[in-house]
Image (tube, grey):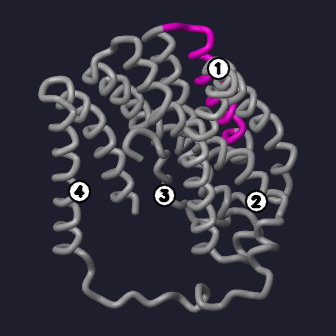
Amino acid sequence: LAFMFAGLYAGSLCGSTLGGLLADRLGYQASFTASCAALLAAAVLLHLFRPRGDWHASSATRKEPSGGALRFLGDSRMAALFLFVVVPNALITVCLCQFFVPLALDRGGVSPASIGRVFLFYSLIVMFAGPALGRAIDKSASMVRPLACSMILAAASVAALLFLDGMPGTLLCMAALAMSTSIASNGQGAYALSLPAAERFGRERTMGAYNVAMRAGQVLGPLSLGAMASLWSAQAGLAALSALALACGLIFPAFSSPGERRGRTRRCPPMPPGGPGG
């Protein structure tokens, strides 16, 4: 799985930059054509190299106690992780990377190639800071504080767009967001699996619920900012997102400190951040 996620990051790094360069030099049609060709190539490679054996679910996956999902979601620490970290982090990451920042730069007259370089800057920070921060999180006494810091960094990334104009504000936003992503992608899944609720519910179902929460945040991101921008203004929407992320970072530790079991759970691979191309 670690190799799979490394490939996802590498594809995100190369694809966002290459797409911008193709659109700038050859037009948007060339960029879409190259994307379609890459998808077809991925489908062919998947068919050629996929495992030929039959997949069998584990016995733990087949058995589900009555009301197990409700008890899992009703656990205060698991609910706090999903509501105050996973969903808002994915919401802000996708909202900025795949919605607001590209639109704002395009309206500011920035070329598609330069927009691609901005996301290259984001991806480089994630690739180089992620492993170092992951090792630091592994050595920390608790994952609660790093995850709370990731939300505060997400709030700072949105605030950078409010207080700085043009490319300087965008680069500072991407740097803070990349640091937030590096922390969250290393800590969210591992922290979820360290909770007693995950042991009762099962590792597979826990990571499935984690992925559902992350995808929900990714869907809500552009929708929420678009709705706030249409009702008020883009600046008001950004201010609301920054306040939301800051509040989540401050509230999360209050629900999450007790009951964490460090050192009893296998390290899980970092999850895709949902940024450019994710």
Seen in the picture, residue 74 relative to 250 is either above or below; the reply is below
Pointer 3 or 1: first along the chain: 1
Pointer 1 or 4: first along the chain: 4
For the residue carrying disc 1, how many other residues have a C-alpha within 10 Å: few (<14), some (14-19), or many (20+)?
some
Q: Which residue is mark 1?
A: 233
Answer left or right for 225 relative to 145: left
Seen in the picture, residue 83 relative to 159 is either above or below; the reply is below
Q: Which residue is mark 4?
A: 39
In the image, is residue 207 part of the stretch drawn in magenta?
no
Asked whether disc 3 touches disc 4, contact meaning CB atoms under 8 Å apart, the reply is no
Q: Residue at x 54, y 35 (%)?
A: 95
Q: Is residue 268 visible?
A: yes
Q: Residue at x 15, y 37 (%)?
A: 30
Q: Report the Cα–Cα distance between label 3 and label 4.
A: 24 Å
Judging depth in this view, the residue of 11 and 220 nearest the camera is: 220
* Residue 269 numbered mark, or none: 3
- Residue type, numbered disc 1: Ser
- Magenta segment, which residues? 146-165
Judging depth in this view, the residue of 41 and 23 nearest the camera is: 23
Pointer 2 or 3: first along the chain: 2
| Helix, strand or loop under label 4 | helix
Image quadrant assignment for residue 14: top left
Q: Which residue is mark 2?
A: 78
- Residue type, numbered disc 2: Met
- Residue type, numbered disc 4: Leu
